[in-house]
Amino acid sequence: MKSVISSPTTTGSDTDYDEDPINTRSTKSYCEVEAMILPSLREKRNAAGLTPHELFTENHKQLVSKGEEWIKGTANQCMVVAALIATMVFGVAFSIPGGYHQDTGLPMFIRKEIYIAFVISDAISLFSSSASILMFLSMLTSRYAEQDFLEVLPKQLMIGLATLFLSIMTMMVAFSFSFFVLYHNMLIWVPISIAVVAAIPSN
């Protein structure tokens, strides 16, 4: 059992990286093997004077480096998209469809239910895109240790992508609702057509 965890049977190859770009599988395999051996053997050193963990780190330097590069590239690209969405929906919140009453300063369609739905969907898009930005920013500032690739980084990536997807969906919903607000009395086919087209990307 000691030879399984302390011998360099696998190395960080390009094939490993293509199948597991964030190094999760390799780290999980190491943790599973480590849990199977006696605690007293985990600090045993091989002929080169390395412990199993030191040997694992040495053999997977390339995978860790490539995984860090992939994570940073993905986080940067997704954060740009999230920032653009946040900028747009924030601007829409103050340039609402129909404008404002000159006397009261309140929105023209404030009593319309469809307008409330528009405001809610726009707010959800803003909050979710902001959460996505924060999640991807935390990924960029990670220390990128082996253990981070096991749980922290995959969870952050999934949460970041989920909130980004939610912000895109609610942005499209808000876009569709804005036309229902403007054309609720006449030309109702216009917002219906736009809503149908807006639903296509989600499929």
Image (cartoon, rainbow, N blue to C red):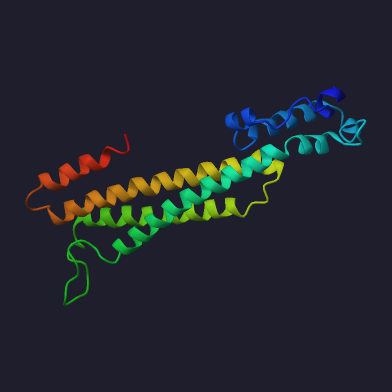
Camera-nearest residue between 53 and 99: 53
Decide which of 161, 62 is in the foreground and name it. 62
Quarter of image, res 156: top right
Q: Quadrant of the N terminus?
A: top right
Residue 97 percent location from the top left of the image: 20, 61
Residue at the (21%, 39%) spot, across then down: 196
- Image coordinates of residue 49 in percent, x first then y, are 92, 36
One can see residue 38 in this view = yes
Residue projecting furthest to the left: 186
Q: Image check: 65 left or right of 199?
A: right
**Residue 126 visible to an observer of this rendering:** no
Residue occupying image coordinates x 23% and y 51%: 177
Query: Residue 76's spot in the image, x, y percent?
Result: 51, 51
Up-down relation of residue 53 to residue 111 (above or below): above
Q: In which quarter of the image is the C terminus?
A: top left
Q: Count every numbered label the image shows and give the total.
A: 0
Q: Where is residue 55 in the image (x, y as percent from the top left)?
A: 82, 35
Residue positioned 80% across, 25% down in the render: 36
21 vs 97: above or below: above
Name the residue nearer the viewer: 119 or 71: 71
From the viewer's perspective, is 121 left or right of 49? left
Residue reaching furthest front? 14
